[in-house]
Amino acid sequence: MAEVAAHAGVSTQTVSRVSNGLTNVEPATRDRVLASMQHLGYRPNRAARALRSGQYRNIGVIMFTLSSFGNVRTLESISIAAAQAGYSVTLIPVEEPTQEHVTKAFARLSEQSVDGVIIVIEAHFVNEADVELPVGIPVVVIDSGERPDYPVVDNDQAQGARLATEHLLELGHETVWHVAGPESSYSAARRASSWRSTLEAAGRDVPPVIRGDWTTASGYRAGIELRDRDDVTAVFAANDQMALGVLRAFHEVGRRVPDDTSVIGFDDMAESDSFWPPLTTIHQQFDVVGQTGMRMLIAEIEAETITPGTFTVPTSLVVRESTAPPLATR
Amino acid sequence: MAEVAAHAGVSTQTVSRVSNGLTNVEPATRDRVLASMQHLGYRPNRAARALRSGQYRNIGVIMFTLSSFGNVRTLESISIAAAQAGYSVTLIPVEEPTQEHVTKAFARLSEQSVDGVIIVIEAHFVNEADVELPVGIPVVVIDSGERPDYPVVDNDQAQGARLATEHLLELGHETVWHVAGPESSYSAARRASSWRSTLEAAGRDVPPVIRGDWTTASGYRAGIELRDRDDVTAVFAANDQMALGVLRAFHEVGRRVPDDTSVIGFDDMAESDSFWPPLTTIHQQFDVVGQTGMRMLIAEIEAETITPGTFTVPTSLVVRESTAPPLATR
DNA sequence: TGCGGTCATGTTGACGTAAACATGGCCGAA
DNA sequence: TTCGGCCATGTTTACGTCAACATGACCGCA
């Protein structure tokens, strides 16, 4: 900056003014400074700016895993929203889903240069005693857990699960079996409990829950359990990947979908319209969740206030070819 | 820091020494300072450190899209490797695959506080004239393009495509059809040219290339083209998603895989072992690519030298159930 | 006992920026 | 013509940290 000032024959303060687009600079001076900046390849030093202003213009994102379709979509929309608002995004990974690594990631966070944090994580881990959310720094949580103390954004898991279950009941199925996500997941718990209450509200039997862990392999195992029972006509898998595993298990023994059994997923991942058969599923608006989270966080940062509360984004049913009325009614 | 010093009754310099783990501090003093830091919740100011040291300990990652399986895997391994080396990772998104947005992302980069950059991108866009790679800052490129001026890491596309093609030839197929990725992609071009030369080396006919754009939808369209021809016994899709689209097109008309036609993919995405049938594919070591890129970048940063060159990571064939000898030979 | 050396700790200054305040020229109204 | 006020620009200072240098206490050996 000093070099630019010398080259343009002005003070550093004038360079600073030009650099920040302040208006009270004579156009001729401005042009001269601009030319010098260009000539010398001047780039403002962000560390110095941050030191001076106390603002990093940087957002931290703590993410449990990049293996889940939803997380990646959310990250993408967060980073685009951040760029548009003039913030950059620092990704803080959690290596393994253990308490220890989550703790470590949070510890790393506090030495980061961030103005705020978005936490996209299974809240079970966050609630554990020895994980301290950073104090004095704005936080938004994207998750389905209970967080009375922070702003929360999430897809409406309960509404989505209801949509899925009702769709199958409306097709005429007597009841719906459920392949749930892992116990450690709040969203899995929400989907399961909404599935259960939807069945109960309709006065139907509630079959035992089959538990998976979001992976296709666990869906496949669930499918093996289900495919031998002839009282299963409809299956609601808590995500598309497990639904895919179920489909595979059914294909192996020639159990037809949707003729013998209807299968519905949850997520609407990019590939699910090309599964065989194309998968009926619940579409989640991860982009809206990410954008909303980012907007809430920036509001927190700039207003310097925290307003706890939960913002829920509705999901929608996408009917494709994996669901149909049960054979008996056709 | 000043507060901590006052509270512990020492100078700020001593606090700095404790904070940086220097050894020449009396244990008793150290403990006192540590206690004060704890008590006051002291966190070193990263901006000031960066300003003082000229090092941000931060890596920028420019990524074209988070929609591709490989990019996400690579990002994940980069961020973990960075964390282990004490660096953080800033994600610089490219909103849309247009020249304009790529240029914008690079411009944004130069105002970032990064010590180095990893570029994971289709190099066609990078080579265009008006995109300037940042000068004076270490860069590693992860891509299959030609970059004589930078260090490059990539999966061995040519070897993978050869593996795929040879696998099908060895099963007894007369030739192999190819569903290629988009023209703008170097890796697509590498896979296609290696497929072609492998066929030529074996003295086989080279069928016309069918071009997709990596998506399942384009694979489906390719599958529709292929499914009506009875001279197609083996298909090599340039990624798993397009292979999935091909499978769907085949299923729709009852064309059996692998009985009537063998299909092989490329990537080994998490779901491909649960496609129907489970997909034979080429496994890429994205984690190795990410780690290696990170290691090369850190070496560049710390040694302050750039050593251009291409580091290639081998791929491997994963045989599942979508490939088999042609009907005629059985 | 004296002197060089080692070690813990303190003091000073600089990194690049921008807010706050200072300066001086010019314009318009009285 | 004079004077208040506005505007462009300059000067000073502080943000938090740490390298470099300074200080002074203590130790051991001659």
Image (tube, coloured by chain):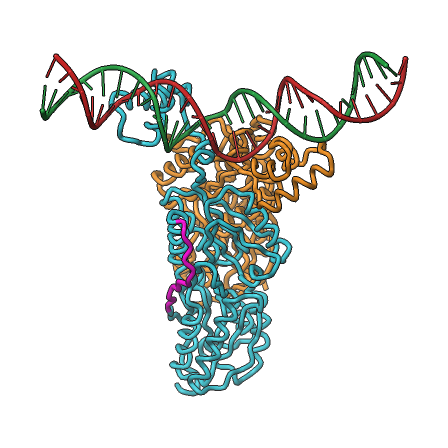
Chain colours: A cyan, B orange, C green, D red
Image position of A28 with respect to B150: above or below = above
Residue at left offset 44%, top offset 68%: A157
Closer to the camera, A142 or A205?
A: A142
Q: x, y (%) of residue A49?
A: 43, 33
Q: Residue at x 54, y 54 (%)?
A: A133
Q: In this view, does A322 lie to the left or right of A248?
A: left
Residue A79, image x, y percentages: 42, 48
Q: In this view, does A168 lie to the left or right of B38?
A: left
Is residue B22 on the magenta stretch?
Answer: no
Q: Can residue B314 be seen in this view?
A: no
User: Where's the N terminus of chain B, which quadrant?
Assistant: top right
Q: In this view, does A171 lie above or below A295?
A: below
| Image quadrant occupied by the C terminus of chain B | bottom right
Q: Nearer the viewer, residue B309 or B113?
A: B113
The image quadrant that residue B281 belongs to is bottom right
Residue A228 placed where, x, y %? 58, 80
Q: Nearer the viewer, residue B105 or B160?
A: B105
The magenta span reads A304-316
Horizontal side of residue A23 vs B106, given as left or right: left
How many tags in the picture?
Answer: 0
B35 is higher (above) or lower (below) than A227:
above
Identify which residue is drawn at 36% across, 45% down: A84
Residue A307: say if magenta.
yes
